[in-house]
Image (spheres, helix red, strand yellow):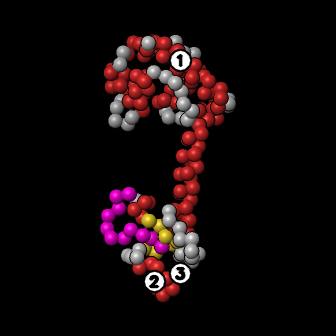
Amino acid sequence: MNINNENKEYELINLKFEYPGIKGGVTWAVISDLSMEELMEKYGDELLKYSPVILLSVEQGEAFKDFHRNEHKHDMREARTKLPINYNEELHEFLGLITSSNVTEDDAINKYDLELLRESIDSLTAVQQRRIKLYFFEGLTFREIAAREGVSTKNVYKSVQEAMKKIKKFWE
């Protein structure tokens, strides 16, 4: 979102940023309580370089800001909770294939040694198996798993890390 800091009576939003691939002539939105006539009367010279524009109410502008704040919070939360784990690249590729929406779990398993995978997962404790499935197959973060199970994030992280070490032994 682009905000005009020089003037508090209106804000600008680049719609190409908000909607990549937007088609048509309008690429800017003006957020203001003023009418289009009042805006053009007061700030016509400034707004001319953004023309054509659409006018949005302050409430609609707040919706854009709320969306960006929530997206930023989500990105920051994910960056904090997705802790790196050292594990075999083949296993990472396999787990990545399964979480991909284009490949079914069966198709991905057929690409690798099914028995070896089953053995490696069966060697895990029930808790490790559940957490591996939640993390890799359901895409939950360590923090989300911890909240669901009522344990610390560190506990979940260590459990998944140990499980990955066990699985890696089968892949060596």
| Residue at left offset 50%, top offset 34% | 139
Eye-nearest disc, 3 or 2: 2
Residue where numbered disc 3 is placed? 34
Looking at marks 1 and 3 on the same chain, the residue that comes earlier in the sequence is marked by 3
**Between residues 116 and 87, which one lies in front from this camera angle?**
87
Amino acid identity at mark 2: Gly
Residue where numbered disc 2 is placed? 44
Residue where numbered disc 1 is placed? 165
Q: Which residues are magenta?
A: 20-30
Looking at marks 1 and 2 on the same chain, the residue that comes earlier in the sequence is marked by 2
Magenta: main secondary structure equals loop
Name the element at disc 2.
Answer: helix
| Residue at left offset 53%, top offset 56% | 68
Q: Is residue 97 above or below residue 20?
A: above
Q: Is residue 151 above or below residue 120?
A: below
Amino acid identity at mark 3: Leu
C-alpha gap between disc 3 and disc 2: 13 Å
| Residue at left offset 32%, top offset 64% | 23
Amino acid identity at mark 1: Lys
x and y percentages locating residue 131 in the rendered image: 56, 26
C-alpha gap between disc 1 and disc 2: 65 Å
Tell me, yes or no, whether the highlighted magenta stretch contains residue 23: yes
